[in-house]
């Protein structure tokens, strides 16, 4: 029996697909690169951009033909799209050839749902508003010598352009001991050189329960584990980057000297409209602290251009910040409306042509900076 997983979106989803693979292999399935050969196809979807959702709808629709050729093929759709109740219902209604629709909170039930489908031969829509942290889901790691380790789920930040807190719910940290146990297992296999801690905002790890300690303490404790490994993490929200964390990066040889610190904009006015809860000055202060502590630290960032209300001056502020920080890498995105978010209803939406110009300008600026740095 063969399975094929299609993954959209971020590293969290890539890791979630590793858990899906783990559950499928537990059931006796093996991977295949060809969806036409698969007995089960799983679409692990992303909701971050409306365009991505539309594309996913198109791609799910295209599976109809495969199902026609083999009626026993199981088609399952999961991920952030199906954690939105109305979208899950729409997929279930629009695509009668989809057998299982399941959200992110109850994804751990996938094995059971597949067995139910096989036994009862009924279509299943399984949705849960929320769930506690579930441990012990089998994982088939597929990211080379890098092992992803989730340390927390959800987000409390409500950046005005982002749908994640509405879909993934509030922050829930895993118990520190569970994280350490999973990492020990990974180290013992001797197959992984790098361990990457994952969370929407790893810097707020532990804020929801004092017994776990904070993120800096977690890093210190992981680095005390025996074994030959390097440690890194993503993503860090600047508002929660503490001095203690900078010390942990500096003092632990196992921590890779790099940080992805999304600034999103160099204009304090726009940062406020984005509800990012830091200013340009605070961000630049963090960069200085990081470089004072670890002079050769690699710093990368995300930037959104054309956020509603972004003027030429605001964009110039972003460019001047980029010139000042001299990033080692920039992921630049044009703002795109995401319905269900506050920013989608804001006035002064920026023209596509202006966004296009700004994103290209920024990418050229990044190239120039890279060339200067050599
Ligand atoms: S920190 Fe902001 S951008 Fe990141 S997931 Fe949370 S709400 Fe979205």
Image: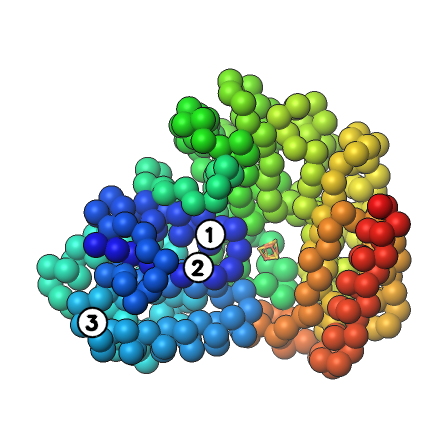
**The residue positioned farthest toward the left in the image shown:** 119
Q: Is residue 83 visible?
A: no
Q: Is residue 121 visible?
A: yes
Q: Is residue 349 above or below residue 292?
A: below
Q: Residue at point 42% right, 77% down?
A: 58
User: Residue 7's mark?
Assistant: 2
Towards the viewer: 227 or 318: 227
Q: Residue at point 30% right, 67% down?
A: 36
Residue 186 quadrant:
top left
Q: Earlier in the sequence, mark 1 or mark 3?
A: 1
- Asked if residue 353 lies left or right of residue 254, the reply is right
Mark 1 surroundings within 10 Å by alpha-carbon count, few (fewer than 14), some (14 through 19), many (20 or more): some
Towards the viewer: 210 or 364: 364
Residue tagged 1: 14
Where is residue 209 drawn, in percent x and y? 50, 36
User: Which one is closest to the eye, mark 3 or mark 2?
Assistant: 3
Where is residue 287 drawn, in percent x and y? 80, 42
Residue 230 quadrant:
top right
Q: Is residue 246 above or below residue 12?
A: above
Marks 1 and 2 in Cβ contact (< 8 Å): yes
Mark 3 surroundings within 10 Å by alpha-carbon count, few (fewer than 14), some (14 through 19), many (20 or more): few
Q: Secondary structure at mark 1?
A: helix
Q: Residue at point 51% right, 39% down?
A: 146
Q: Earlier in the sequence, mark 1 or mark 2?
A: 2
Towards the viewer: 327 or 343: 327
Question: What is the spatial separation of the Cα atoms under label 1 and label 2, in whole angstroms?
Answer: 6 Å
Q: Residue at point 79% right, 49% down?
A: 327
Where is residue 271 drawn, in percent x and y? 75, 60
User: Residue 70's mark?
Assistant: 3
Residue 134 quadrant:
top left
């Amino acid at each position: 029996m063969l399975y094929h997983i299609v993954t959209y979106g971020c590293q969290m989803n890539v890791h979630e697909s590793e858990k899906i693979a783990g559950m499928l292999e537990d059931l006796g399935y093996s991977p295949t690169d060809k969806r036409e050969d698969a007995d089960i196809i799983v679409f692990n979807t992303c909701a971050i951009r409306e365009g991505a959702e539309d594309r996913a709808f198109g791609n799910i629709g295209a599976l109809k033909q495969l199902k026609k050729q083999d009626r026993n093929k199981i088609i399952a759709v999961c991920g952030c799209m199906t954690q939105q109740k109305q979208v899950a219902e729409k997929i279930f209604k629009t695509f009668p050839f989809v057998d299982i629709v399941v959200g992110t909170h109850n994804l751990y039930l996938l094995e059971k749902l597949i067995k139910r489908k096989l036994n009862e031969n009924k279509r299943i829509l399984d949705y849960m508003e929320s769930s506690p942290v579930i441990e012990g889901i089998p994982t088939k790691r597929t990211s080379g010598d890098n092992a992803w380790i989730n340390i927390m789920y959800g987000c409390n930040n409500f950046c005005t352009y982002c749908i994640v807190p509405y879909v993934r719910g509030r922050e829930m940290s895993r118990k520190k001991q569970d994280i350490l146990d999973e990492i020990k297992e990974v180290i013992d296999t001797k197959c992984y050189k790098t361990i990457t801690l994952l969370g929407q905002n790893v810097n707020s790890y532990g804020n929801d329960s004092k017994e776990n300690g904070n993120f800096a303490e977690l890093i210190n404790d992981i680095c005390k584990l025996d074994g030959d490994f390097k440690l890194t993490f993503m993503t860090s929200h600047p508002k929660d980057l503490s001095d203690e964390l900078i010390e942990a990066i500096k003092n632990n040889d196992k921590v890779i000297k790099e940080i992805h610190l999304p600034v999103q904009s160099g204009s304090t006015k726009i940062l406020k409209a984005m509800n990012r809860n830091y200013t340009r000055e605070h961000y630049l202060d963090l960069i200085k602290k990081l470089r004072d502590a670890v002079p050769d630290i690699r710093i990368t960032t995300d930037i959104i251009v054309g956020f509603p209300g972004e003027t030429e001056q605001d964009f110039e502020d972003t460019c001047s910040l980029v010139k000042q920080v001299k990033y080692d890498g920039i992921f630049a995105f044009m703002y795109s409306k995401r319905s269900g978010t506050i920013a989608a209803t804001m006035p002064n939406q920026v023209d596509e042509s202006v966004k296009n110009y700004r994103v290209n300008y920024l990418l050229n600026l990044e190239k120039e900076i890279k060339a200067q740095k050599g």
